[in-house]
DNA sequence: TAGCCTCCTATCCTTACGTATAGGTAAGCT
DNA sequence: AGCTTACCTATACGTAAGGATAGGAGGCTA
């Protein structure tokens, strides 16, 4: 079983590596960032499993996942994440990831998950999928309508009204309206503050 | 050598644990948060070394460090940190920590540091102390001029150009110029993205 | 001294944002 | 039926933001 493990924290990477090699009889190839990982995938052929840290230089959200997937023949790539937002797991899977592993998971569970994924099975912790069922997890989110949340999401990506309008297939004026009500509800003076407040609160 | 390792990420804690026990002939007692750690210190007597994750439930910045220090007879407590801001290391030491370990450090180096600290010696990576000399601790901040940082600070509060101009006693046009160069340097499309990127990077 | 960099200012112009006002649809409640 | 709420659209206007270009003052340095 050949595994590529990419994480910028040497300590984390090396100890997980050692653990997998001892207990999992796996060969672990290390990488410290996305470009390093892509390079190793190119040179050392496809791996049984590629584990990518979610917050790592070059990852750029889930953009790095797509790159790794195409490099590894479109399969066998999973995301490792520290603070595991359920929605991201969902997105990772829909992009083609074979798994999503929060670091809050135990080492033994990681081992099982790795065996699972290396065998081609998709693995995600159950509680992450459960959270996804009721998306009204956040106190701030409850004050906002679904549409407003969509618009807020755009704001948090720094998109313009026009861009958000295109994404949601609405008119620009409509977006302006939503932005205005958002600013009122979030007690923000403008879109930038609204975005910062939403980020601060942990939405998105 | 008895070590208490407190980290809320099971995976990280367990694999580091395993590593230290295998290679370091240490006995590692785990804890998942600060209160758990304090409890174990109370019950299982003082440890040769206590390792506390910096971002962990209950830590509350370095407040948790002080608590752990007083529980462990005022010594033998070190901080483990993911993204290691040099300034924090400095503060931790002045509070009485026996070490500051960034997770970007290799596993073997951790082992050495642990032996060092368990023997009562203070350990901090050299590069962290060097950085402390020049207060431009942040990688992103180095690319920006002092003025640009001031403007960026205003951006991160959601202020308008006019407001920032008043705060810094400059003309509004000048702020626009700085905002534009900031967007270029931060690779942002507009002020909102610039603010988000700065926040994300931990500036402000 | 000439050249470079940072910082500041200035005009001019286009686009984006924010606000107001007004009206329409659909769903759900009383 | 009347009411509320969420949602979408429209017109219009003033302001903010973003971009281009040009130039000056001061500091640093080859």
Image (tube, coloured by chain):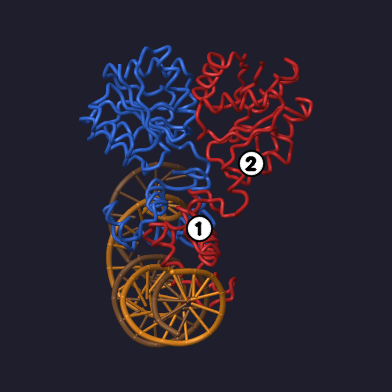
Chain colours: A blue, B red, C brown, D orange
Residue A53 on image: x %, y %? 40, 33
**Looking at the image, which residue is at 56% across and 41% down?**
B84
**Looking at the image, which residue is at 30% across and 16% down?**
A1
| Secondary structure of residue under mark 2 | helix
Instruction: Read off the chain for label 2.
Output: B
Comparing B106 with B10, the one in front is: B106
The quarter of the rendered structure image containing the C terminus of chain B is: bottom right
Q: Which mark is residue B89?
A: 2
Q: Where is mark 1, residue-wise? A: A193
Residue B164 on image: x %, y %? 54, 69
**Looking at the image, which residue is at 44% across and 19% down?**
A18
Q: CA distance from mark 2 to mark 1?
A: 31 Å
Residue A163 on image: x %, y %? 30, 57
Same chain? Circles 2 and 1: no
Residue A119 on image: x %, y %? 28, 16
The picture quadrant where one finds residue A35 is top left
């Amino acid at each position: 079983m050949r595994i590529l493990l990419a994480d910028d924290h040497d300590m984390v990477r090396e100890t997980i590596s050692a653990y997998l090699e001892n207990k999992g009889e796996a060969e672990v190839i290390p990488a410290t960032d996305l470009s390093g990982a892509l390079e190793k995938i190119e040179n050392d052929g496809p791996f049984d499993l590629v584990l990518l840290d979610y917050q790592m230089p070059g990852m750029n959200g889930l953009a790095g996942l797509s790159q790794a997937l195409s490099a590894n023949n479109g399969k066998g790539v999973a995301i490792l994440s520290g603070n595991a937002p359920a929605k991201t797991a969902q997105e990772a899977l829909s992009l083609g990831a074979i798994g999503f592993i929060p670091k809050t998971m135990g080492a033994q569970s990681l081992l099982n998950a790795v065996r699972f994924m290396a065998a081609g099975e998709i693995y995600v912790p159950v509680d992450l999928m459960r959270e996804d069922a009721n998306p009204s997890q956040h106190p701030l989110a409850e004050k906002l309508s679904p549409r407003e949340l969509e618009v807020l999401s755009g704001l948090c990506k720094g998109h313009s009204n026009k861009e958000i309008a295109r994404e949601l297939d609405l008119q620009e004026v409509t977006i302006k309206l939503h932005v205005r009500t958002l600013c009122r509800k979030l007690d923000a003076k403008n879109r930038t503050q609204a975005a910062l407040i939403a980020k601060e609160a942990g939405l998105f």
